[in-house]
Image: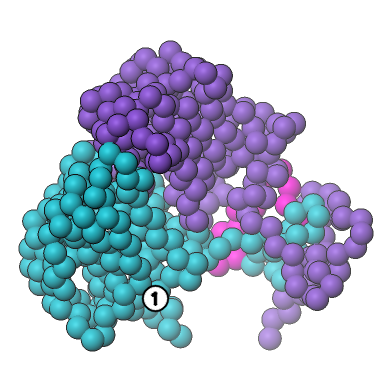
């Protein structure tokens, strides 16, 4: 049988290990001998490869649309070629949604679908690790403060989440907060686009929003 | 390349070629960096999504339950195993009472006729690379006719809301994300019933991974 070597382990001590990069570290075990696991997406955030976007100021809301239009998302993120993102959280808080049937729909597709518009209300992109060891995200983000014009994704579109609330009157019980935090994330190999539609039948909803994702070079993906 | 060892991850992420001996990645604290097997399958391009592609093109459910009339049906072919891990349904204009969503699965290919893919698409959860799905999806925009699964039916999830008052009801959004998903060895069928006093209109997303059955059962 081929010798595959050994895996060295070390029971977790009061002082956390601080292994240097590219060294052979010892796998940390608890006192019951269980490996201490680190979710790989959290490891990417810890590395500085996690990013977030949000309204530049909480009181600067972005307006959604009256009625759905495939070419008019309220948020559009574009991933450049050579990089991959895995979005893991979208939060949309709806304000003044006095019309009925307010919808939030999240989707993605191949290609850079941005055409024009957007950005009248600034979205701020930051690293989820405060010292930003990898600097800025390679993605571009556009808000529908000025209407975005996007190429219609049509049949290649992947709609992955839908949310609706009636809000027929200014409701006293329903909460207009949408949180999409999937257990398993989609994989957007750049060039690719990630978009969020927010629309209603009669009154365009104002929103605050946040998107969070991990980002890395595409060549690290399985072949 | 050396196998069976650990290596603390560096600035550059490892990118081992297929079939090579990789090292186990640790973070700087010695923690094992693990990847969930379903997420790994999605990353490899074998996660799939069947959903509305036009968000305002809603699908209509039924006015009452009929075992042979699901609102969504995904059928997996022989030779492939399907592990469904996510179903999302958002109900609109459900002015009637007692709106139900029921998710189930069964052995065998139960699709008989009807249905279609109007307003929907079945695509990979990875934008490029990976494989082609061995599943076929149908939605009830045109009524689906399914063989009654009968006594072998596995009902995985039930949801109900009264919706007597549209103005004050809470959001009508269902997300089914089981901690331990079922395993459907093809041929097999996953289906979703959506029905109420007034046929509810809805949008949806159904997601799963696929694995060759030969790999799965040995």
In the depicted view, which residue is nearer to us: A7 or A183?
A: A183
Quadrant of residue B99 within the rendered picture: bottom left
Give the quarter of the figure containing the N terminus of chain A: bottom right
User: Is B188 situated left or right of B178 in this image?
Assistant: left
> Is most of the magenta stretch helix, strand or loop?
loop
CA neighbours of label 1 inside 10 A, class few (<14), some (14 to 19), many (20+): some
Display coloring = by chain
The chain that appears purple in the image is A
In the depicted view, which residue is nearer to us: B142 or B156?
A: B156
Q: Residue at x 8, y 56 (%)?
A: B142
Q: In this structure image, what is the colour of chain B?
A: cyan
Residue B161: x and y in percent read 30, 56
In the depicted view, which residue is nearer to us: A50 or B204?
A: B204
- Tell me which segment is drawn in magenta: B8-20
In the depicted view, which residue is nearer to us: B39 or B59?
A: B59
User: Is A23 situated left or right of B109 in this image?
Assistant: right
Q: Residue at x 9, y 68 (%)?
A: B145
Residue B65: x and y in percent read 16, 68
Q: Residue at x 25, y 43 (%)?
A: B166
> What residue is shown with label 1?
B183
Q: What residue occupies the far right of the structure in this picture?
A: A14
Q: Is residue B155 above or below residue B41?
A: below
- Inspect the magenta stretch and tell me whether residue B183 lies in it: no
């Amino acid at each position: 049988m081929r010798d595959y070597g050994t895996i060295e382990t070390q029971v977790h001590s009061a002082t956390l290990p601080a292994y240097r990069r590219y060294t052979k570290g010892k796998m940390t075990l608890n006192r019951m001998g269980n490996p201490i696991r680190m979710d790989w997406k959290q490891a990417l955030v810890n590395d500085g490869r996690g990013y977030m976007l949000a309204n530049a100021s909480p009181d600067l809301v972005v307006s959604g649309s009256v009625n759905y239009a495939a070419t008019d998302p309220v948020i559009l993120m574009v991933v450049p070629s050579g990089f991959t993102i895995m979005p893991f959280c979208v939060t949309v808080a709806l304000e003044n949604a006095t019309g009925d049937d307010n919808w939030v729909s999240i989707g993605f597709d191949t290609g850079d679908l941005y055409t024009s518009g957007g950005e009248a209300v600034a979205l701020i992109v930051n690293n989820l690790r405060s010292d930003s060891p990898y600097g800025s995200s390679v993605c571009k983000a556009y808000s529908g403060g000025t209407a975005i014009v996007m190429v219609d994704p049509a049949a290649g579109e992947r709609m992955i989440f839908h949310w609706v609330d009636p809000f027929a009157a200014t409701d006293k019980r329903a909460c207009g907060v949408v949180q999409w935090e999937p257990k398993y994330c989609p994989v957007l190999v750049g060039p690719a686009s990630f978009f969020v539609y927010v629309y209603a039948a009669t009154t365009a909803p104002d929103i605050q929003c946040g998107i969070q994702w991990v980002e890395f070079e595409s060549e690290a993906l399985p072949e | 390349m050396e196998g069976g060892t650990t290596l603390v991850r560096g600035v550059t992420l490892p990118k081992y070629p297929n079939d090579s001996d990789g090292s186990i990645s640790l973070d700087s604290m010695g923690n094992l960096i693990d990847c969930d097997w379903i997420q790994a399958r999605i990353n490899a391009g074998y996660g799939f999504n069947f959903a509305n592609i036009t968000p305002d093109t809603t699908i209509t459910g039924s006015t009452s339950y009929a075992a042979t009339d699901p609102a969504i049906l995904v059928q997996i072919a022989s030779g492939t195993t399907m592990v469904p891990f996510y179903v999302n349904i958002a109900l609109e204009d459900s002015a009637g009472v007692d709106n139900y969503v029921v998710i189930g699965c069964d052995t065998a290919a139960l699709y008989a006729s009807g249905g279609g893919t109007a307003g929907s698409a079945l695509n990979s959860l990875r934008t490029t690379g990976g494989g082609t799905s061995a599943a076929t999806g149908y939605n009830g925009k045109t009524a689906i006719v399914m063989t009654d699964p009968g006594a072998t039916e596995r009902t995985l999830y039930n949801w109900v809301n009264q919706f007597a008052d549209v103005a004050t009801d809470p959001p009508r959004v269902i997300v089914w994300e089981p901690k331990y998903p079922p395993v459907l060895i093809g041929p097999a069928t996953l289906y979703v019933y959506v029905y109420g006093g007034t046929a509810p209109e809805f949008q949806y997303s159904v997601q799963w991974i696929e694995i060759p059955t030969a790999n799965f059962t040995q």
